[in-house]
Image (spheres, rainbow, N blue to C red):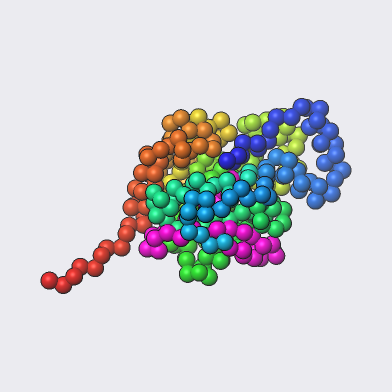
Amino acid sequence: MGDMNRLLPPLALAFALLILGTAALAPQPALAAMDHQFVFFPEAHLVATPALYDLPFEEVFYPTADGETIHGWLVPGDPERPLVLFCHGNAGNISHRLDNLRLFHRLLGLSVFIFDYRGYGKSSGKASEEGTYADARGALAWLQQRGWQPQRMIYFGRSLGAGVAVQLALEQPPGALVLETPFPSIAAMGWRHNPILYLLLGWALDARYDSFNKLARIHVPLLMFQGDRDHIVPEKMARGLFERANQPKTFHLIRGAGHNDTYEAGGEAYWQQWREFLQRHFPPPEKQQGEG
């Protein structure tokens, strides 16, 4: 819901010039605030919890290395299967991903940990690129304390969350990486959607999310989902990012899907891709054969 759909919206050139003049005289904190005009769109109010779908869940608050307190939910699944560490997009909060959690649980039986970036939902602080990375590191540390190791995890990132998942995979490789409607970088998005505005104001954005230059350094199985009607991250842009990735990798194009409706538009074929990916890279343990 709302993933990247307001990134770098068109503005009148006169307004851009006014901001540019203000930003040129502004201290660094004011420049960092530019990210909240173009990149981050948090919502504080949680509309519901996993209880809405009768999902079992644990409410979690964990600390980050820089002193923030991050809120998340752990939805338990089959303990013999991998856990999905879910990095969501740039708008809303974790409560806007409840239907996705329900389907992960019902159709795949996987455990899922989803967290809100700082400044989103019940998480303290204010979002920034480095802050989202710290929040993901904190989530991983909390899961490791609970006995989950990265090799038993799938880092799943959607839209802006793909950039977070890529950074985490670069630092602590998971068992696999799943990216949905990922973009190469903030710069690539800016030049595509509003090159004049980005030329004027791009320097004032702290966020980079440069997955294009990071993905080639990651060596874990990759599954990438992309909609063929995505006007935010076009198919060609996603395929260019996919080409940067190492094998083994799979690209699944979803016919009729835009940026924010991938799993709905994808239907059963979407979930079958997940099942096949899991079977290849996380085969279920063989049952012990009883003696004759």
Question: Visible in this render: residue 211?
Answer: no
Asked whether 23 or 262 is in front, the reply is 262
Task: Identify the residue shown where x is 56% and y is 66%.
Answer: 142
Q: Is residue 187 left or right of residue 245?
A: right
In the rendered view of the protein, which quadrant contains the N terminus? top right
Q: Is residue 267 left or right of residue 138?
A: left
Task: Identify the residue shown where x is 68% and y is 33%.
Answer: 9
Instruction: Find residue 72 and report its image quarter.
Output: bottom right
Q: How many marks?
A: 0
In the rendered view of the protein, which quadrant contains the C terminus? bottom left
**Extreme residue toward the right, this view:** 25
Task: Identify the residue shown where x is 50% and y is 43%.
Answer: 180
Q: Which residues are magenta?
A: 60-89
Rendered view: 170 above or below 19: below
Image location (x, y in percent) of residue 65: 66, 65
**Extreme residue toward the bottom, this view:** 291
Task: Identify the residue shown where x is 66% and y is 49%.
Answer: 45
**Is 62 a magenta residue?**
yes
Question: Visible in this render: residue 102?
Answer: yes
Rendered view: 114 above or below 195: below
Image location (x, y in percent) of residue 141: 56, 66
Image location (x, y in percent) of residue 270: 40, 41
Image location (x, y in percent) of residue 159: 56, 43
